Image (tube, rainbow, N blue to C red):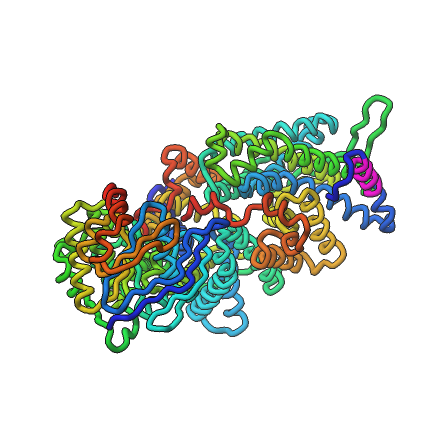
Amino acid sequence: MSARLEVRDLSVAYGASRAVAVDKLVVEPGTLAAVIGANGAGKSTLVNAIANWSRAEPRVEGAILMDGENIAGLPAHHHVRRGLQLVPEGRGVFMGLTVEENLRDGAPADAGPGRKTYSVQNVYELFPRLHERRTTQGGSLSGGERQMLAVGRALRMAPKVLLLDEPSIGLAPRLVSLLLQTVRMLVDSGLTVLLVEQNVRAVMEVTDVVHLLERGKVIASGAVEAMRDDPRIIEAYLGGSHG
Amino acid sequence: MSPLRPMSRLAGVIALAVAGFFLPRILGGSTSVYDTLVVIAIFSAMSYGLDILLSDLGEISLAHTAFFATGAYAAAILTVRYGQNAWVAMVGAVLSSLALALVLGAITLRTREFAFSLVTYAAAIVCMNVASNWDFLGGSDGIVGVPPLDLSIGPLTLTAGQSAEFWPFAYVLLLLTLYFVHRFRRSSLGQAALMVHMNPRLAAMCGLDANRVRLQVFLVSAPISALAGWLYAFQRSYVGTDLFEAYFLVLMLTAVIIAGRRVLLGPLLGTALLMSQKSFASLGAYGDKLVLGAILVAVLCYSPQGLAALWPRRRAGAADAETPSSNPSVRSQHG
Amino acid sequence: MNVLQQVVNGIIIGHAYALVAVGWTMLLGAARLVNFGHGQMYMVGAFVAWWFMKTTGLPYPVAVLAAIVVGALIGAVLQRLLMKLTLARDLVSLMIVTLGFGQMLEGAAGLAFGPKPQTLSSPFQAMSLRFGPIWFTVQDAILVVATIAVFLALRYVLNATKFGTAIRMVAEDPPLTRLGGIDVSRVYMGIFAFEGAAVAFAATLVAPRTPILTSMGFDQVVMTFVVVVLGGIGSVAGSYAAGLCLGLFTALFGALVSPAYTTAAVFALLIAVMALRPGQLAASANFAR
């Protein structure tokens, strides 16, 4: 049901400038790993490159291993089939479609053994608010509802590994908590999650492992208890809590 | 261009220009050679009007057939209906094309990309529609009996009645057009156009009003095609609605695109290639259309930056700076 | 002048405009592509039907089906050609390719079908119905009914089927659609095939009214363009309404002012709309509605 994600020698460049250079990053099955760092550290770039998806045209090199199989370079719909799902930053839902429509038409043809599938009903159970708003268009939802919907859409693909890019942006603190608690629940039931966040405080409450990204490189990694007292993390706290 | 000293470079260009004048004679001097070369010269000049808009500003105007036709019709009407001489006809051609460009420019002021292309295309069709229905413009029969070209001033006799006689005029028109485009690219308007095309945000920060630049370039480009039309009216001695047809449009586009963007001799070489096919290896009117369309499609699908991009030239660095690859302004519209 | 008859004519012409425009607006709305070869595809649709009837002797309805199939194939070929350019993200070249493609079609049609005007004969063209002061042919009636059927079917597909949702997703946000595991190029293929099929279908229904020439279709784009802009790019209901209004406009303008200058008048109308509502040319938020 959950898979191991490993990133090796990943390099991402836009034009002539190198945005990300990560030698190794591992997310163990069924754990929640957070990538934190300041604005522009390359967090979105990193996670987009893992999913081989972007709204721009980066040059990506390196290996992305899911349960040992290198999926780097495969087009996005192949990632979906293998169970890697990305919830992108910003626009992650279709504004012109209703909540129901956003959720209804996603499901890999054969989810394969051991993949937890989420029906539309399951998503509504996870996010009751979405059920209330199911005939509303994506464009009319609040930021928090849109984020829930984006996560719901990702779940509909029966993922083994879920990548979340800054889900807390623009959300009220209470909603951020709620969302991250829900993510934690998903992890506890077996999903592997890599979470990219600026809101260090909220993330520290739910994550298992922390990676600190600075200028495209991972400069510190460790279990959350160990990292809590790391001065660099504390500095990120002070910087990141403005996010 | 190799790094020759400016004086020797100028000498080289002049030598080439003089040699070019004798080209028809070198190629045998038959009527068909003269005809083909005259037509190449005229149609290239027509294409240069589109060239500065497309290569420098990055906007695809599909109205340049209308400017070409306007020049031709102006020449025909002024000489046939009003008995004016060729000089007056020339002025008329330029002014009427400017007027049309002003109207079209005003209409398309705030349109971009596909909207701009569509509106200019529609405008050309409407002009064709009007020309084929309005008796003043000859209706569907067009205007016949355009007199031989007579640009004589005082004691200097400058006339042309047959192909060989047209060659000097066509050639001079071509040279003037090339010179004009060359200077345009070095002018502040030309540089502004390029900046607006390649980096609209930077251009705005430099105080360039994109809309004004576009309009200006549009206005500058229209008379170029119109003058080609003016000469064509005399060469063919007949003006009709076929001048508006898509064939000329596709011809212009292919000529401009085939060699590569912002290559000075590009449209000339492109036109020469296409017209030579039509004159010497024609597959009939329909076959030629098929070939022309196929060439355009093939060049765009397999080498969108033109054939020049296929050559790994030592100038590759400079060429990349001049020819925009994925057009960033396009993406910002459609992204 | 029989105003009622002109209104009826306008309604009939309007449906023709709408049907001719429907594929074009879908393509523009969903794929952001202007198909300059649209007029030539129309012409080929008519000629394929004519040729089919002449060569096989099969009846008109079968010829219509043949034209639709060929039209869909032409659309598919165009999509394949453009795939390479879409990958290179050169949107501007995409447009010119359709222009070149149109020229190819025109040349090929001229070679295949000859320069002479032909008549696509439909048995329904000769049958007419009269109701008091107005009359129309059965062909006209079929045109109207078929157009309404196509629009309703399209509306249904777009709003109630999985493929329709995929089209709407692609129209809004292709990268996000890809992220959802959908093969976007398959969706484009469907849209292109629809454009080819729809315009061919329209041609077979409208062409019996007048002689057909391989040089026709060039000016088709203007009317189609105006319908699409007036109705809102990508809007199904909008294209229908705009087509109808435009049909009435041309019928009345033709009768009251001058039949020759209708294209110019329509263009003037377009300019007026663009001047008053500059946002009209943006991709409609009402896509597929």
| Boundaries of the magenta span | B8-20
Tell me if B42 is positioned left or right of B319 in this view: right
Residue C244 picture location, percent across and down = 35, 47
Visible residue check, residue C42: no
Residue A124 lies in what quarter of the image? Answer: bottom left
Who's the residue at 60% across and 29% down the image?
Answer: B188
Magenta stretch encompasses residue B14 = yes
Residue B216 lies in what quarter of the image? Answer: top right
Who's the residue at 67% across and 38% down the image?
Answer: B229
Residue A110 picture location, percent across and down = 29, 75
Residue furthest top in the image: B154
> Which residue is nearer to you in this view: B318 or B207?
B318
Residue C171 lies in what quarter of the image? Answer: bottom left
Position of the C terminus of chain A by quadrant: top left
Position of the N terminus of chain A by quadrant: bottom left
Residue A23 picture location, percent across and down = 40, 61
Who's the residue at 71% across and 37% down the image?
Answer: B178
Who's the residue at 31% across and 66% down the image?
Answer: A84
Q: Is residue A155 above or below residue C13?
A: below
Visible residue check, residue B37: yes
Q: Is residue B335 above or below residue A68?
A: above
> Which residue is nearer to you in this view: B41 or A27?
A27
